[in-house]
Image (cartoon, rainbow, N blue to C red):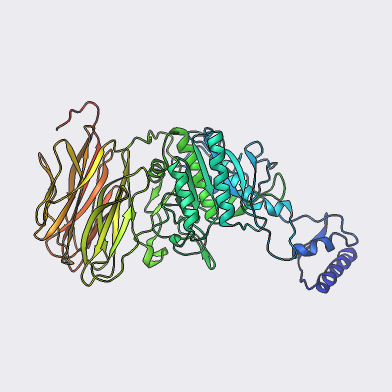
């Protein structure tokens, strides 16, 4: 090592050690460039820059091959010519409010795309000595803004971003600060209405009833809120705002489309997650300099991807509600790509197996299309007749209700109404290990729907004339439910009931909707039977039939009805498939 380099290294070690710091010299350069690469605390920086022979200090940064970032290539549904990132639109009609750290607005990726608002509500940083370097304070917000709408790293490059600072230089905020930020946004939207608008929440805290309530109120006032699921390798329902059902909650997957896991941390999972998105080694703007880039990982990066995809979708259909937007996100997602074995056993059924992607450039999907999703409850207690409830979100209609039990002991399900909202209530059976309720929640139905129950036990439930039957349910007060007979879809549209059981029928009144049954019997020795609705038809109801008592329940995944049996019983899957009647086809009412 040349003498000036060796002298400087010794002096730096000595000065740092005197103040209780250790440094590590990783590389020395003595050719065209004289210097060394050193790993040290930022607290040592002011001492290092004053040493003899030191002209300047530069933080190490990343360099990248010049191609489309892998994550942007991955979310394209149809692959374009190499080197091009082509979208149906750039999201230019959409405004995004980003609640995060401060943002370096002079970065070449987001210059003229981000407006810093006059709002700031952050706590003091922890620790006695905190270096408030701009590059550190802007780090998280700059990266997220770049993923949303960056010039080269962004998903929706025309979307405008409004920075609302609620996190400090350490990436820490408070619930009260987040509430104030939401209040600021709501006030801004009242004085200067913007539509469509997305509120992006790339942060997570412990469960907060107050924060959830504020988010719910904003969604009910026609604002889309999209939140990170969190990086705690835990149940997302334990945290806020991701536990709020009205918020669109995003988990993270890695390059292999599997749940993101880094050491002891990893994406949160469970039924409070709506969809996953790419969140591993995502290239975006670095706040180290105006042309620097870096990679970061986490559910914050995943939710930024979905905010960009949502901007593209809202640009196509600007009047879509939050519920309709979620249905569109799920419709365009890649399904059944996550290995269930990579998920915790107690969350495998309820965690959505979908990774968000951009719409195909040929897609004609709009908010008025009939789209449905399955909403799972948490598992009930194991005591007999214990209940659990699944609900649809604001703007969705529940078109059917089913239940599922791992050991098959269930007392069925029923639909109740509370505070003007339908609830799918599943009942645990005798000797049950807990039961799940599964609500089929839909948008674009263009119908007036009601849930009817049988006049007394053992009698079926029939829809009124000029109504379509979208799903059947049944329940038993004895603690065990048997399979109902096949629903009727002819001149009479009805849900039969076995002796001692109540039946429930979801009936929708509209001249534009038509529904029909599709069934599929067992094949081989498999305990799982599936049946799917054809293209242009949407699955609204799912039931299972069996010659024995071994049906563990039925649930819908995507456009497929899935029925599980046990004990060697042979099951049949019954799907209720509906669609908007083609304009040239007369009604059969």
> Do we see residue 29 in this rendering?
no
Between 281 and 551, the residue placed more toward the observer is: 551
Labels in figure, total: 0
Q: Quadrant of residue 111?
A: top right
Percent position of residue 453, x then y: 17, 50
Question: Residue at left 20%, top 28%?
Answer: 585
Q: Quadrant of the C terminus?
A: top left
Q: Is residue 525 above or below residue 292?
A: below
Q: Quadrant of the N terminus?
A: bottom right
Question: Residue at left 78%, top 55%?
Answer: 58
Between 564 and 441, the residue placed more toward the observer is: 441
Percent position of residue 502, x then y: 15, 56
Between 48 and 527, the residue placed more toward the observer is: 48
Percent position of residue 295, x then y: 61, 53
Q: Relative to 509, is 213 on the left or the right?
A: right
Percent position of residue 127, x then y: 71, 65
Question: Residue at left 41%, top 39%?
Answer: 321
Between 510 and 13, the residue placed more toward the observer is: 510
Q: Quadrant of residue 280?
A: bottom right
> Do we see residue 300 in this rendering?
yes
Q: Residue furthest top?
A: 584
Q: Relative to 47, is 228 on the left or the right?
A: left
Q: Is residue 327 above or below residue 265?
A: above
């Amino acid at each position: 090592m040349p003498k000036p380099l060796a002298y400087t290294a010794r002096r730096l070690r000595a000065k740092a050690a005197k103040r209780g710091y250790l440094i590590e010299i990783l590389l020395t350069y003595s050719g065209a460039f004289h210097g060394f690469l050193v790993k040290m605390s930022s607290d040592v920086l002011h001492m290092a820059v004053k040493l003899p022979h030191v002209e300047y200090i530069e933080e190490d940064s990343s360099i990248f091959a010049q191609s489309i970032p892998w994550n942007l290539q991955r979310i394209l549904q149809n692959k374009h010519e190499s080197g091009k990132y082509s979208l149906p639109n750039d999201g230019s009609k959409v405004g995004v409010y980003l609640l995060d750290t401060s943002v370096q607005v002079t970065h070449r990726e987001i210059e003229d795309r981000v407006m810093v608002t006059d709002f700031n509500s952050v706590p003091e940083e922890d620790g006695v000595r905190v270096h408030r370097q701009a590059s550190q304070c802007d780090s998280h917000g700059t990266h997220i803004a770049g993923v949303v709408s960056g010039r080269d790293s962004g998903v929706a490059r025309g979307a405008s971003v409004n920075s609302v600072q609620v996190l400090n230089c350490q990436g820490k905020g408070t619930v009260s600060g987040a509430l104030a930020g939401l209040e600021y946004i709501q006030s801004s939207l009242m004085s200067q209405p913007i539509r469509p608008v997305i509120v992006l929440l790339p942060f997570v805290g412990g469960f907060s009833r107050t924060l959830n309530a504020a988010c719910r109120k904003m969604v009910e006032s026609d604002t889309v809120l999209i939140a990170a699921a969190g990086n705690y390798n835990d149940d997302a329902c334990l945290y806020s705002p991701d536990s709020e059902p009205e918020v669109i909650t995003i988990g993270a997957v890695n390059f292999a489309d599997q749940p993101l896991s880094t050491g002891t941390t990893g994406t949160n999972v469970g039924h409070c997650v709506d969809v996953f998105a790419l969140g591993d080694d995502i290239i975006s703007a670095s706040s180290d300099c105006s042309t620097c880039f870096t990679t970061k990982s986490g559910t914050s990066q995943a939710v930024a991807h979905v905010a960009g995809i949502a901007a593209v979708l809202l640009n196509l259909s600007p009047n879509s509600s939050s519920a309709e937007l979620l249905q569109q996100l799920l419709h365009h997602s890649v399904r059944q790509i996550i290995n269930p074995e990579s998920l915790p056993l107690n969350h495998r059924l309820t965690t959505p197996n979908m990774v968000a992607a951009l719409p195909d450039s040929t897609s004609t999907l709009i908010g008025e299309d009939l789209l449905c999703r399955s909403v799972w409850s948490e598992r009930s207690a194991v005591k007999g007749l214990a209940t659990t409830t699944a609900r649809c979100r604001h703007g969705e209609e529940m078109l059917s209700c089913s239940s599922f039990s791992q050991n098959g002991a269930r007392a069925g399900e029923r639909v109740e109404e509370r505070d003007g909202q339908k609830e799918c209530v599943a009942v645990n059976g005798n000797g049950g290990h807990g039961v799940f309720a599964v609500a089929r929640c839909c948008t674009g139905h263009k119908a007036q729907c009601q849930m009817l129950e049988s006049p007394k036990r053992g009698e079926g439930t029939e829809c009124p004339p000029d109504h379509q039957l979208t799903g059947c349910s049944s329940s038993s007060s004895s603690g065990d439910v048997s399979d109902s007979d096949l629903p009727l879809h002819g001149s009479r549209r009805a849900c039969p009931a076995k002796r001692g059981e109540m039946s429930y029928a979801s009936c929708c009144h509209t001249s534009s909707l038509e529904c029909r049954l599709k069934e599929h019997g067992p094949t081989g020795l498999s305990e799982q039977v599936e049946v799917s609705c054809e293209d242009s038809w949407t699955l609204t109801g799912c039931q299972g039939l069996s010659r024995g008592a071994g049906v563990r329940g039925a649930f819908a995944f995507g456009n497929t009805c899935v029925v599980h049996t046990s004990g060697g019983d042979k099951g049949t899957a019954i799907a209720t498939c509906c669609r908007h009647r083609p304009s040239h086809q007369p009604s059969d009412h």
